[in-house]
Image: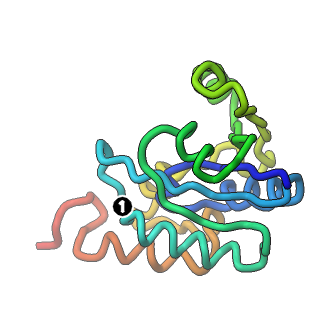
């Protein structure tokens, strides 16, 4: 059985992430989406919220499971018995960073290969950071995230005005 991991912050999950998940799930027997619990970042959503959102939007994919993790990708992949890491690429700038990470992971764990999937062109510009910024200013994010996620994102900004400060 071929198992792959697709790690990320998913803060929040975007339609671009979902595209990579769906395409990866067609390639492998089991895909484990790893939600990174990075203590050095201040995420919009807790790791539990991100796991729950991903579980909800991947219900239609029987070979996908969602797990939180912290630490090194190579350790998470070993725990999941995965021989492949999936990474999505939007632009050439993503490739440079992802190539370095892939090569580093390969040195630490020679059994772990990395597959790069280029994003669908309609999501090439999209990132969770962009979604958070647009939502922060009250913009329409329905073209960026699954429909069930839109309201959850906006709920995080309740009590803030369009300039990001508290309402007065």
Mark 1 burial class by Cα count in 10 Å: few <14, some 14-19, many 20+? some
In the depicted structure, whether residue 155 falls above or below residue 37: below
Residue sitting at 73 percent across and 58 percent down? 31
Residue sitting at 40 percent across and 53 percent down? 37
Which residue lies most toward the left here? 168
- Report the side of 142 relative to 46 (left or right): right
- Report the side of 82 relative to 159 (left or right): right
Give the number of callouts. Answer: 1
- Report the side of 7 relative to 114 (left or right): left
Q: Nearer the viewer, residue 110 or 127?
A: 110
State which quadrant residue 112 falls in. Answer: top right
Whole-percent x and y of residue 50?
48, 66
Whole-percent x and y of residue 2?
83, 51
In the depicted structure, whether residue 152 falls above or below residue 17: below
State which quadrant residue 88 falls in. Answer: top right
| Residue at which label 1 appears | 44
Q: Nearer the viewer, residue 68 or 157?
A: 68
Residue sitting at 37 percent across and 77 percent down? 155
Whole-percent x and y of residue 65?
66, 67
């Amino acid at each position: 059985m071929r198992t792959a991991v697709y790690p990320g912050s998913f803060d929040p999950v975007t339609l671009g992430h979902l595209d990579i998940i769906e395409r990866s799930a067609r390639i492998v027997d089991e895909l484990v989406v790893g939600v990174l619990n990075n203590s050095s970042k201040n995420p919009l959503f807790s790791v539990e919220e991100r796991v729950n959102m991903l579980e909800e939007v991947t219900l239609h994919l029987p070979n996908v499971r969602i797990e939180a993790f912290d630490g090194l990708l190579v350790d998470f992949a070993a725990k999941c018995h995965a021989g492949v890491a999936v990474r999505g690429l939007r632009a050439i700038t993503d490739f440079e960073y992802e190539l370095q990470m892939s090569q580093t992971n390969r040195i630490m764990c020679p059994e772990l290969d990395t597959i790069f999937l280029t994003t669908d062109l309609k999501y090439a510009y999209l990132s969770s950071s962009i979604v958070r910024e647009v939502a922060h200013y009250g913009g329409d994010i329905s073209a960026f995230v699954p429909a069930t996620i839109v309201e959850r994102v906006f709920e995080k900004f309740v009590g803030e005005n369009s300039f990001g400060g508290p309402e007065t």
